[in-house]
Each structure stands twice: as C-alpha cells, then as structure tokens.
C-alpha cells in the first residue's frame, strides 16, 4: 500500500474497541500551522461540587461523555465545581459543554485557578455565556496561560433551569502534548493514547476507548454516520490502519462500513486514504473452562471474559482442611504475590462470616489495584483492605448486595508490628455501592492517609453509607482521613435489635479517638435517620472539618446530630441543611461536642 503522510485521521462507523495506525517510518515534520489542541487535562480527574442532584453527580464532568451531566442543588446559586488536575500545569483554554441536544440557555459563570486549592484567581471573568445546540452546546473560554493545579467554575445564573448544569469541563494547556512533536518510531502505533474526538457517543462508551490500547473497552456512536478523529501530534508515513472489536464470543459477527481519511497540518481538507467498504468483524470463541486454584504468585491470569473463564471454589473454605495459609482463616483465594488477574469471573463457595470460633482472617498486602470490577451477593465484605494493607486503590467498580461492608480499610492491631503494619494511604475512588444487606457502604477502621472520594452509595439496609469507627480493635487514626466528592442516597438505618440508629455518614469513636477528619463536597439526601452523626463512644472526634456539604431530607433525624455521649468538635463551612425531621443541627443534652458555624 502506498505510504501516505498525514497528521489527523477519521474513522467512520458504529463500534470500535481498538484503533491502530501501523507500518510507520519516520517522516519530516513540516512547518505547522497553529498547533492542534492537546489532550484534555481534566479527563478522568477528581472533581467535586458544592452540591449535586442525586442522579447527576459531579464525576460526570470529567468522564469524557457529553451525554452525562452534573446538576447543582435545585434553587441554589451560586454553585461551583472544582477539578484537581493532579499537578501544576499551564492552562490557557477551558471548554464547557451541555448535552448536545438540549435547548439553548445562557449561564453566567466565572473560571478560576489555584495552585494550592485554597486561594483562587480569576482566569475568565464573570460573564453570561450562551450554550446553543447549533454550536453543539459548547462554550470555549481562552485566556493567557497560567500555572494552576485546581480549576474552579463558579455559576451564578442559568436561564434554562433553576440550577447550575454542565456535562463537561475540559481543560487544555500549552504543555498538553498538542504541538508539533517528533514522528513516531518505525512500526509503533502513533494513535495510542492520543487526543481523540467523536461526532457522537452513547452512554459511557466514549471516544477515548478507541485508542486506549485495550479491546475490552469500546467507543459507540449514537447513530450513522459517525466519525472518529485522532490527532497524531506529528506527521508520519502511514501504511495501514487497524480497527478492532472485542474478540470475545459475546460479540457476535457483524459488518461495518468504514472509510479512512487523513490530512497533514498544512491542509484544511481531508483526503480519502481507504475508500468506503464493508468490513466483517468475527469473534474469537474459546472453550468455556472452569478452574480451581489454591495459591498463585508471579503470574498473570487473563481469561476470555467473564462468561467463558470462571474460577470456582469447589469446597467451602471452612471445610477445606487447612489448604490455605492458617493466618488467612481459609477464606477466599490464596493469592500471594505479584499476580495480575483480569477478564474472568470468580465464584466463591463460602457461606459463613468467620473462621474457627468466629475469627475473621486476611493477609495484609500493599500496592494492590482493583479496577473495573463487579462484586455481587457476598456473605461478607466486598473488598476489605486489612492487616496493614497499604498504598492500594479500589476504583471504577460496582458493588451490590454485600453481606458486610462493601468497601473497608480495617487497620487491625493484631499484626506482627502494630507500629508499622498499619492500613494507610488506601483509596476508594469512583465506585458505586448499592444495597449492602448488612453493615456499611464504605468503612474506615483506623490508619492514616486513607481517602473515600467520588463514590456513590445507595440504599443501605441498616448501617451508614460511610462510617469511620474505632470498633474491631484497629490501630489508631492519625494524620488526615479524607471524605470528599461522594453522594449518599437513602443511607443509614437501625441495627442490633434496632436499638442503634446510624446516620448516613457516621463517626463512632468507640474507644480510640478519631482525629484529622475532613469531609467536603458531599451530597447527602433522603437519609433514614441523621445526615451526619457523631456517635456516643469512649473516644473523641476532635476538629472535624466539614465544608461544601449539602444535606437534605433526613427523614427521621437531624441534618447533623451529636449524641449525648459524643465528645469533640466540628467546624461547618458552606454547609446547607434542609428538610430535616428533627432540626438542622442538634446537640443532645449531656454532650460536650461543639459545633462551630
């Protein structure tokens, strides 16, 4: 095939899991016109808001989809959203979007930047900006480049709705990788990870999935015709373009009509590189298999998909005769070290909640990463980072119907060295928890540096959506514990013969103190009892910092409650409480807890 030099390319079709430009030899980068826009520096970054509608949280702003959107608290202005870019970068452009099909509206807003997250400077002054479907409901704001880490959009009015609304906050900068670069090495894929745009997307199947190097993610358009444009960043001689779908047999055989076009930086029009033609995609069926394992280390296990590759425990753990390590209590799979597991289903056979004498087991590990999981119908916890587990992350996963905490850090003191084997710097991010039938949505028991960020928790049966506690013999809390950007909906409940009532977000210093707690940018709605509850215990909860939190409809309790035996203090900043059955803020008689407002 004749090699053709181009800087951008377009693929037309419906579904793509992989997009690869192949057969390259270096070309000479010519004189470029204005540099192409670099990658979106906000994509996938942590984002928080002063308030959110329960069904439209702030995390939709950086998910790469224009179909999903954030909506602020109804009838409340000003509202703001804040994106943490992960490090200081020079930015010069912000693109704001609403769903492309929405009717036109004007929103008055300011864009601000900060290097430390506390002191903000205006990047684009307050002004009314029209979002028009004729311009894809997109507003682009440019300004002199500034070094920032935190970017904030403050909205004070919306002519189309009685709340602030945005579906995307995109951030671009001078050092975003969009300028002329070096040509790729011969034989490499210049499309991998480059900025990519689609004419349309549906649900969460965004354009970035087409060149992320994976076949288990994919882009899907909202209809035909559709285009996918990748900016290669430098000109190169290209001999082939490879398009892929997931080879899993679950993807049936299909035919798509595809045309490939490209242009170099000096051209304004695209040239056809491969004429439109029908191309058939076939699956790669694999024999269905079932596997049982006792212990693994230093291996990678990658299945053919959850419907085809399944791991089963054939013997209930408590009847396994000690085949697992004794200190693990014969629970679950014996995965020791340096192991990667993906693209499979695991079916456990355990139906009890403890080992011999009711003891609970587990091994402390570090550097664990759980992502893209679906955990369902467990008899105990979904994921419990225990016995000194540290520097681990659970993200972008879904938990439903767990028999204990869906997510937990349990920094148990029953370890070799309680002074060093603490649960620390673990992170729960961007997860969805639904219907735990016992205990909490998310819980932290001791340790330091642990965070709960940008999670959604729905419909707990009897315990909080999020709980910080010192029962279960943990090591002490120290440093900071951060609860930020979460949404708690219909959480809290009653347990222990219904003698104890729990708030949606509860702090329970049963014995040890719980210092260093920061709660911010959180939406708590329709709680069974209190929105935030400071429970009676033997320890104190000093200097809790609560900011930019919205609490609404605490059905059988207060917005914020300090029980009669609670000790400590909390400072409220920009906290909104409405619709509470027993008052906005209540300190029960006998309590020494102090709430500063």
Image (cartoon, rainbow, N blue to C red):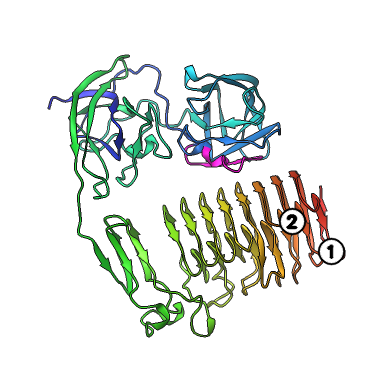
Around disc 2, counting alpha carbons within 10 Å, would you say few (fewer than 14), some (14 to 19), or many (20 or more)? some
Task: Identify the mark nearer the N-term, 2 or 1.
Answer: 2
Horizontal placement of 536 versus 410: left or right? Answer: right
Residue 55 is one of the magenta-drawn residues: yes
Q: Which quadrant of the rendered structure holds the N terminus? A: top left
Magenta span:
43-60
Q: Which mark is residue 480?
A: none
Is residue 29 magenta-colored? no
Q: Which residue is mark 2?
A: 556
Question: Residue 32's x, y, as percent?
Answer: 34, 18
Camera-side residue: 230 or 155? 155
Q: In the image, which is nearer the foreground, mark 2 or mark 1?
A: 2
- Which residue is at the far right? 589
Q: Residue furthest left?
A: 1
Distance CA(mark 2)–CA(mark 1): 20 Å
Q: Residue 494, how many percent across, how many down?
A: 67, 65
Is 299 rendered above or below residue 321?
A: above
């Amino acid at each position: 095939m004749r090699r053709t030099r181009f800087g951008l390319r377009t693929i037309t079709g419906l579904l793509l899991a992989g997009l690869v430009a192949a057969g390259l030899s270096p070309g000479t980068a010519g004189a470029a016109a204005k540099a192409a826009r670099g990658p979106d520096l906000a994509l996938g970054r942590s984002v928080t808001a002063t308030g959110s509608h329960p069904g439209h949280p702030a995390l939709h702003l950086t998910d790469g989809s224009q179909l999903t959107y954030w909506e602020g608290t109804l009838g409340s202005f000003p509202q703001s959203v804040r994106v943490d870019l992960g490090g200081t970068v020079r930015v010069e452009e912000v693109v704001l979007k609403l769903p492309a099909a929405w009717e036109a509206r004007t929103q008055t807003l300011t864009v601000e930047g900060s290097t430390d997250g506390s002191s903000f400077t205006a990047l684009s002054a307050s002004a009314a900006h029209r979002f028009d479907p004729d311009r894809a409901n997109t507003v682009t704001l440019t300004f002199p480049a500034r070094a920032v880490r935190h970017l904030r959009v403050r909205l004070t009015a919306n002519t189309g709705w009685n709340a602030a609304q945005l579906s995307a906050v995109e951030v671009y900068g001078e050092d975003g990788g969009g300028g002329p670069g070096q040509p790729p090495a011969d034989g490499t894929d210049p499309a991998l990870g480059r900025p990519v745009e689609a004419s349309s997307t549906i649900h969460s199947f965004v354009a970035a999935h087409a060149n992320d190097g994976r076949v288990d993610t994919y882009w899907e358009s909202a209809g035909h015709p559709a285009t996918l444009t990748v900016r290669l960043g430098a000109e190169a001689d290209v001999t082939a373009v490879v398009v892929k779908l997931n080879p899993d047999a679950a993807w049936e055989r299909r035919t798509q009509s595809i045309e490939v076009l490209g242009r170099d930086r000096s051209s304004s029009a695209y040239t056809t590189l491969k004429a439109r033609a029908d191309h058939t995609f076939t699956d790669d069926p694999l024999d269905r298999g079932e596997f049982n394992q006792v212990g693994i280390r230093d291996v990678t296990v990658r299945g053919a998909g959850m419907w085809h590759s399944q791991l089963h425990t054939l013997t209930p753990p408590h009847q396994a005769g000690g085949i697992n390590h004794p200190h693990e209590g014969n629970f679950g799979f014996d995965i020791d070290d340096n192991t990667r597991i993906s693209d499979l289903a695991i079916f456990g056979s355990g139906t009890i909640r403890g080992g011999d004498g009711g003891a609970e087991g587990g091994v402390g590990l570090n550097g664990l990463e759980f992502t893209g999981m679906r955990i369902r119908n467990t008899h105990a916890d979904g994921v419990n980072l225990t016995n000194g587990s540290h520097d681990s992350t659970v993200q972008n996963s879904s938990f439903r119907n767990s028999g204990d905490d869906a997510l937990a850090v349990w920094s148990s003191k029953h370890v070799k060295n309680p002074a060093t084997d603490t649960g620390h710097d673990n992170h729960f991010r961007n997860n969805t928890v639904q219907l735990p039938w016992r205990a909490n949505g998310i819980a932290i028991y001791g340790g330091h540096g642990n965070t709960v960020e940008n999670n959604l928790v729905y419909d707990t049966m009897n315990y909080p959506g999020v709980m910080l506690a010192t029962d279960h013999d943990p090591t002490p809390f120290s440093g900071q514990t951060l609860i930020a950007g979460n949404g708690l909906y219909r959480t809290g409940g009653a347990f222990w013969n219904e003698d104890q009532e729990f708030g949606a977000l509860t702090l329970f210093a049963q014995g040890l103190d719980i210092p260093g707690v920061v709660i911010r940018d959180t939406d708590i709605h329709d709680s069974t009892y209190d929105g935030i509850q400071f429970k009676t215990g033997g320890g104190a909860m000093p200097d809790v910092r609560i900011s930019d939190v919205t609490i609404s409809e605490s059905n059988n309790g207060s917005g914020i409650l300090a029980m009669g035996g609670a000790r400590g203090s909390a400072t409220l900043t920009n906290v909104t409480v409405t619709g509470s059955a027993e008052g906005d803020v209540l300190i029960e008689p006998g309590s020494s807890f102090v709430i500063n407002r």
